[in-house]
Image (cartoon, rainbow, N blue to C red):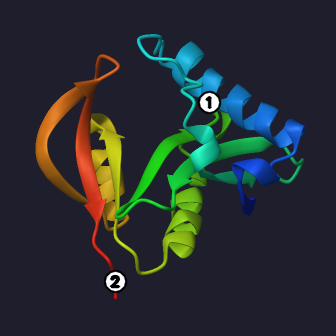
Amino acid sequence: MELTFDHKRFDDLTLRELYAVLQLRDEVFVVGQKITAEPEVDGLDPQCVHVMGRNPAGRLVTTARLFMDESPIVVGRVAVANSAQRRGVGTQMMRYVHDIIGDRPARLSAQAHLESWYAGLGWIAYGDPYFEANIPHQGMKRPGQG
């Protein structure tokens, strides 16, 4: 599936873009994974750059948020629509994220079943596994390239 990507700071999102991002995250995390222990809308989105990947019909099918002012950069809320999973969409999105990050170091909290997928994209596991929202997770880092 060929996607088009862009990214914007929170204040530059249109209302429709913000709605689509929140709707997709709700579909993936709250409805699909039954994560209700912590609020999906957590008040941190205004600090982030939001990555958006759209299919040829213009529908948002993948998103992530980046805390670009952190060091290392923090990647979070990586979501792929259920209808687009296992079709290379997440890989395309993470490559776009890598382009944004450039040579800066980054970290993320990966769901444990995705650890090897992230490792294939150059991320390295660190620390012990832990539970977040009652789901096993693993800390992952991407060393700076410079």
Q: Is residue 87 visible?
A: no
What residue sits 53% from the left and 43% below the top?
A: 86
Question: Alpha carbon of mark 2 to alpha carbon of mark 1: how far?
Answer: 30 Å
Is 103 drawn above or below residue 76 in the view shown?
Answer: below
Residue 8 disc label? none
Q: Is residue 5 visible?
A: yes
What residue sits 59% from the left and 50% below the top?
A: 48
What residue sits 88% from the left and 48% below the top?
A: 58
Q: Which residue is mark 1?
A: 25
- Residue 80 lies left or right of residue 122; in this view the side is right
Q: Which residue is mark 2?
A: 145
Out of 10 and 106, give the one closest to the viewer: 10
Is 129 drawn above or below residue 98 in the view shown?
Answer: above
Is 69 drawn above or below residue 33 in the view shown?
Answer: below
Amino acid residing under circle 1: Arg
Asked which secondary structure carries label 2, the reply is loop
Out of 50 and 53, give the one closest to the viewer: 50
